[in-house]
Image (cartoon, rainbow, N blue to C red):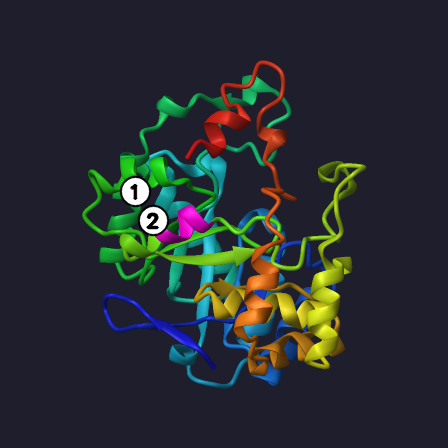
Amino acid sequence: MKTFTLANGDHIPAFGLGTWKSAKGQVTAAVQEALRIGYRHIDCAPIYGNEQEVGQALANYNGPRQELWLTSKLWNDSHGPEAVRPALEKTLLDLRQDYLDLYLIHWPIHFKKGIAFARGPEEMLPPDAIPVQETWQALEECVHAGLTRHIGISNFTSNKIEHLLAQASIAPAMNQVELHPYLQQKELLTFCREQGILLTAYAPLGSGDRPKMMKKTDEPVLLNNAVIAEVAKKHQASPGQVLIAWALARDTVVIPKSVNPKRLQENFMAQELRLDQEDMERIASLERGWRFVEGDGFCGPGSPYTLEWLWQK
């Protein structure tokens, strides 16, 4: 299994299991099956609503804890420095763990405390209400307390990372972002590499199973792309395997989600697929700047956030 080495010598598996959209009643069995197959990296978040079920699967794992890599995230209502450690401790309780390997700020968006999904601007706080450095300092204290080995961010652009780095004592280990052939994020990938920050690709297969309210009527279906299909046929692989292999070939972490045992195995085997230069060049030509997870739900009428602010480079 391909891994990346972090500053303290820890190794993060480049391939993992995403759990966003994995339903209660399914996710425990899915994580157990993934661990049986050989997955050792599980990506979680409290807003997914299933960390307790993931914790049930982890409790049944008989291997050494140090073989696992567990990631979770700080939700938008817990950015206040006094709320960071309690949020992490709740995740640890749900996952039945003593520590995480990686804890991320999920979005650079502030909700009022106790708000899961802001229904209007009155349930939000403006960007400058909680300086990111205050949240980050509280995360650094969680590292010092042994609650998480590494900290990072998610859905952060280069300028937001630069702002954070200006006052960070511990540099982010990871930036988790949407990443696939329709949104290749080449500039962000280069910037993060220069800063020693890894990228994790979420929605690597196009997130076709996300809620309807998050979809556009004219959106492309990545798994149906003709070029991807041709590359898959060439290698006697599936389109999903090609997309996973592409992410790994770019030296990014990739976390495809599935609860289907056959698909879990298929995704795992994608690690053995090697794309050649011609494949990579053909896939590179597919860039569209297309976001399947646009974040527009944070940017409605009266919101202190806009898509321009959220994704400004």
Q: Which residue is mark 2?
A: 191
Secondary structure mostly seen in magenta is helix
> Which residue is the site of mark 1?
136
Which residue sits at x=59%, y=35%? 295
Could you tell me if residue 110 is visible in this image?
no
Q: Mark 2 is on which residue type?
A: Phe
Direction from residue 230 to residue 160 in the image, left or right: left
Span of residues in magenta: 186-190
- Which residue appears at 61% of the width and 77% of the height? 270
Of mark 2 and mark 1, the one earlier in the sequence is: 1
Residue 276 image point, x, y percent: 55, 75
Query: For the residue labelled by badge 1, is the local secondary structure a helix, a strand or a loop?
Result: helix
Magenta span contains residue 244: no
User: Which quarter of the rendering shows the C terminus?
Assistant: top left
Viewed as shown, does residue 225 lie left or right of 41? right
Task: Give the Cα separation between the discs numbered 2 and 1.
Answer: 20 Å
Report the side of 59 relative to 71 (left or right): right
In this picture, is 232 found above or below 150? Answer: below
